[in-house]
Image (cartoon, rainbow, N blue to C red):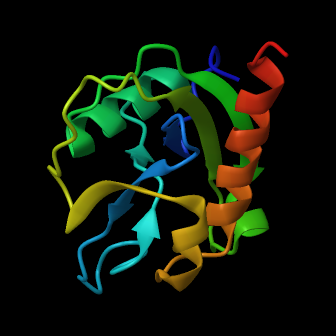
């Protein structure tokens, strides 16, 4: 998932805290942008020649100041599977928050950790919880028992 270039892709990383909370971005409420005023997974469009993993990590750092250490592949959707129009891929990765780096909102209204039980009351697209739950399951599968 991270090797080939994907010029028509939006990529993001679900950064999980130990308690399962995810780092989310509250988008600006500007009608000309995608998902205005909604809570989203930090990410964005790839730059020319960028591979999805690089683009996702760059976007998260640009938007939140968080530098992901070990992002792992999570999911790859065609945009229509998640309710968007057009012809692009939406590629997600996941990582565990290191507990040390400071989060700073560099784009949008806020960049904060939200607990899973709090997200239902926030304005968001339905796929946010779907992708978040995939990340929680992936983290659980990686933890030794």
Asked if 32 appears above or below 4 in the picture, the reply is: below
The percent coordinates of residue 133 (x first, y second) are 73, 52
Q: Classify the position of the C terminus by image quarter.
A: top right
Q: Classify the position of the N terminus by image quarter.
A: top right
Q: Quadrant of residue 32?
A: bottom left
The percent coordinates of residue 104 (x first, y second) are 16, 44
Asked if 76 appears above or below 54 in the picture, the reply is: below
**Image side of residue 109 versus residue 125, left or right:** left
Asked if 35 appears above or below 41 in the picture, the reply is: below
Q: Residue at x 51, y 14 (%)?
A: 70
**Image side of residue 31 versus residue 78, left or right:** left
Q: Residue at x 24, y 42 (%)?
A: 64
Q: Residue at x 52, y 38 (%)?
A: 16
The percent coordinates of residue 49 (x first, y second) are 43, 22
Of residue 88 and residue 105, the one placed in the foreground of this image is 105
- Does any portion of residue 6 appear in the rendered image? yes
Q: Quadrant of residue 73?
A: top right
- Does any portion of residue 51 appear in the rendered image? no
Count numbered badges in the picture.
Answer: 0
Q: Residue at x 34, y 38 (%)?
A: 60
The percent coordinates of residue 13 (x first, y second) are 51, 38
Q: Quadrant of residue 39?
A: bottom left
Asked if 68 appears above or below 116 in the picture, the reply is: above
């Amino acid at each position: 998932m991270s090797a080939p270039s994907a010029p028509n892709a939006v990529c993001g990383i679900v950064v999980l805290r130990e308690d399962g909370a995810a780092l989310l971005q509250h988008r600006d409420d500007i009608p000309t942008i995608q998902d205005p005023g909604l809570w989203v997974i930090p990410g964005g469009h790839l730059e020319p020649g960028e591979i999805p993993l690089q683009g996702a990590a760059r976007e998260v750092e640009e938007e939140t100041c968080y530098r992901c250490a070990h992002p792992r592949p999570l999911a790859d959707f065609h945009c229509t599977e998640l309710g968007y129009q057009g012809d692009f891929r939406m590629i997600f990765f996941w990582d565990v928050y290191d507990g040390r780096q400071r989060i700073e909102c560099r784009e949008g209204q806020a960049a904060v950790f939200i607990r899973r039980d709090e997200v239902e009351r926030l304005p968001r697209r339905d796929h946010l919880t779907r992708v978040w739950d995939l990340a929680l399951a992936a983290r659980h599968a990686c933890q030794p028992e």
